[in-house]
Amino acid sequence: MVCSRESVENYHGHPVSHFVSLIDPGEKDPSIPPPSVEKDLSLAFSDLDDIEVTLPRFKRYQPPEREHIEELVGFGREMSDLSEWGLLLNCEAGISRSPAAAIIILTAAGYRPQTAFGLVRRVQPEMLPNRRMLRLSDEVLDTGGALHRMAEIHRQKAFLRAGYEDPTLVRQREAQLEAQQSWWKRWMRSVARRLRRENRKVPGPK
């Protein structure tokens, strides 16, 4: 159901009828759909969540937006007969964007949010579905925040088992520290300018 970009060719012998490829903006989609595919969708956005979009280092990247989610939902809602189609999604690593997209599509196709989440987790136990995508899909699908909550809980448990801190929280803390240091430097420069105007020297360390 979900895989990395380089693993797509492994599914060319499977009865895949619906194929979704998630790529980075500006990237040419290198994946070739299985020959059995009847309907495919390709979307371009970066793998950013709500924490990362607030950080300066990611300003030039394109996060997933509501219009991307609406396309995934529309794709899922066209799957009327759930028993006669095979769904395959891919992204760079098959861990974040494609699992989130699979959960969204299955929910849009008629599965309960908990069932959709569980099905994708079963085929990709190492998934860390993109939380921004699922938050936006909760709005589009009117699922009351259920998908985002499950993603948060799943992520917390995954990093707890792994024994290390969520890297997005580390990046957020680093950005906050950088912002504080930047503010302090600006304040010191403003004090130095004011003292120079007053023909006074900036006091050095004692």
Image: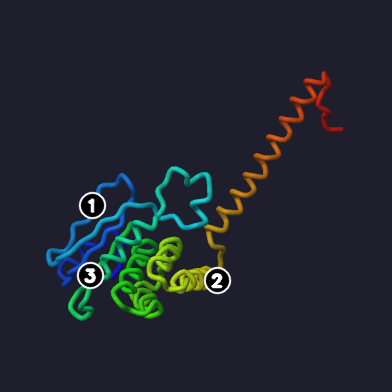
> Residue shown at 57%/54% (left/top)?
172
Q: Is mark 3 on a helix, strand or loop?
A: loop
Q: How crowded is mark 3: few (under 14 residues within 10 Å), some or many (20 or more)?
A: few
- Within 10 Å of disc 1 (Cα), the crowding (few <14, some 14-19, many 20+) is few
Instruction: Name the kind of residue labelled 3 in the image.
Output: Glu
Percent coordinates x, y for residue 182 in the rendering: 65, 39
- Left or right for 85, reference 97: left
Which sits earlier in the primary sequence, circle 2 or circle 1? 1
| Quadrant of res 112 | bottom left
Residue 66 % position (x, y): 38, 58
Residue pictured at 52% horizontal, 57% vertical: 168
Q: Quadrant of the N terminus?
A: bottom left
Q: Which amino acid does label 1 sit on?
A: Pro
Residue bearing the label numbered 3: 78
- Residue type at mark 2 is Leu
Instruction: Estimate the spatial distance between the alpha carbons at disc 1 and disc 3, rounded to whole Å.
Output: 25 Å
Helix, strand or loop under label 2: helix
Sequence-wise, which precedes: disc 2 or disc 3?
A: 3
Circle 1: element type: loop
Reading the image, the residue beneath label 2 is 160
* Mark positioned earlier in the residue sequence (1 or 3): 1
Residue at image mark 1: 30
Instruction: Please say if the residues under marks 2 and 1 sit with CB atoms less than 8 Å apart.
Output: no
Vertical order, 42 against 147 (above or below)? above
